[in-house]
Image: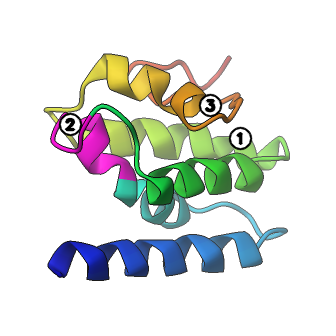
Amino acid sequence: MKGAVAAVIAILAVISLVAQHGQAVTCGQVDAALVPCIGYLTGRGGDSPSPACCSGVKAVKDMAQTTADKRACSCVKAAANRYADLKDAAAQSLPTKCGVRMDIPVSRTVDCDK
């Protein structure tokens, strides 16, 4: 039950983030969108990302449409670095597994200046 409540909260957060399109992206928005992906990225959530996770990945892509919003790269990198047990292969495959083409790789080592 606790997991279901967290999933609902995460989905609502993603919906509110998408509704705010047009405003500058904050790291808090990126973090909230990617929270449902933690289980998959750390290997505790199965072989595939959840629908809530993929919704978050799509929301991050939608948020980062302008050059100024590309700062989301730094936010994604910072979020990835908060999890020592993050699996790099899972992180790199996340957009593809969600069917999203992203310019921002989910990685601890990405060079956000490129």
Q: Determine which quarter of the picture holds residue 70.
A: top right
Give the secondary structure at mark 1.
helix
Q: Are marks 3 and 1 in contact (CB under 8 Å)?
A: yes
Q: Are marks 3 and 2 in contact (CB under 8 Å)?
A: no
* Nearest to N terminus: mark 3 or mark 1: 1
Q: Nearer the viewer, residue 85 or 100?
A: 100
For the residue marked with disc 3, what is the amino acid?
Answer: Ile
Give the left or right position of residue 17, taking residue 76 as reference: right
**Residue 31 drawn above or below residue 77:** below
Numbered mark located on residue 42 in the image:
2
Check the image and tell me how it is coloured.
rainbow
Task: Please state the extent of the stretch shown in magenta in the rendering.
Answer: 37-46
CA separation in Å, label 3 and label 2: 19 Å
From this viewpoint, is residue 55 visible? yes
Q: Residue shown at 36%/45% (left/top)?
A: 79
Q: Quadrant of the N terminus?
A: bottom left
CA separation in Å, label 1 and label 2: 25 Å
CA separation in Å, label 3 and label 1: 8 Å
Numbered mark located on residue 104 in the image:
3
For the residue marked with disc 2, what is the amino acid?
Answer: Thr
Q: Residue shown at 71%/70% (left/top)?
A: 18
Q: Residues within 10 Å of mark 1 (few under 14, many from 20)?
A: some
* Nearest to N terminus: mark 3 or mark 2: 2
From this viewpoint, is residue 108 visible? no
Q: Which residue is mark 1?
A: 70
Give the left or right position of residue 87, taking residue 78 as reference: left
Where residue 28 appears, as percent x and y from the top left, is: 47, 66
Front tag of 3 and 1? 3
